[in-house]
Image (spheres, grey):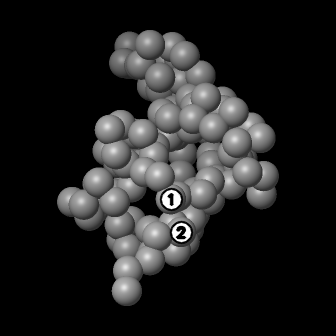
Amino acid sequence: MAVETEAGSQEVAKMPVVVEFSGGLEMLFSDQRRHSLSIPVATSEGKPATVAFLIDYLCRNTMKDTRKELFVLDDHLRPGILVLINDADWELEGEEAYEIQSGDNILFVSTLHGG
């Protein structure tokens, strides 16, 4: 979804979301646990933004660490990472297919620990 501006350029419609990382994942995201983001409401194909889109967006735009494989594996969230969408397990919300809503809070928690 794009919004036409006066200058004729297109501006992508965005929505606010809060993304949080815990269990060591914050180290992949500039050692910052909480990120208040403004993400596109739709993909470049015009489909609603989903958690799968958000994961890719985070890897492309927010993750500063080069170890992407600690967060995603084969273009999906790595096993061992729990996801809560507005304090509910993402399995109850449709996992990667969940369509993100303005103001959502999405928490990624790693259950994998070194030792």
**Mark sitting earlier along the chain (2/1):** 1
Q: Are marks 2 and 1 in contact (CB under 8 Å)?
A: yes
Image position of 8 with respect to 11: above or below: above
Q: Residue at x 50, y 40 (%)?
A: 54
**Tag 1 residue:** 80
Mark carried by residue 33: none
Q: In the displayed structure, does residue 70 sit left or right of residue 11?
A: left
Q: Nearer the viewer, residue 102 or 96?
A: 96
Q: Nearer the viewer, residue 37 or 50?
A: 50
Image position of 112 with respect to 72: above or below: below
Q: In the displayed structure, does residue 42 sit left or right of residue 66?
A: right
* Residue 111 visible in the snapshot: yes
Quarter of image, res 25 = bottom left
For badge 1, the amino acid type reads Gly
**Tag 2 residue:** 111
List x then y, in percent, for residue 51: 56, 38
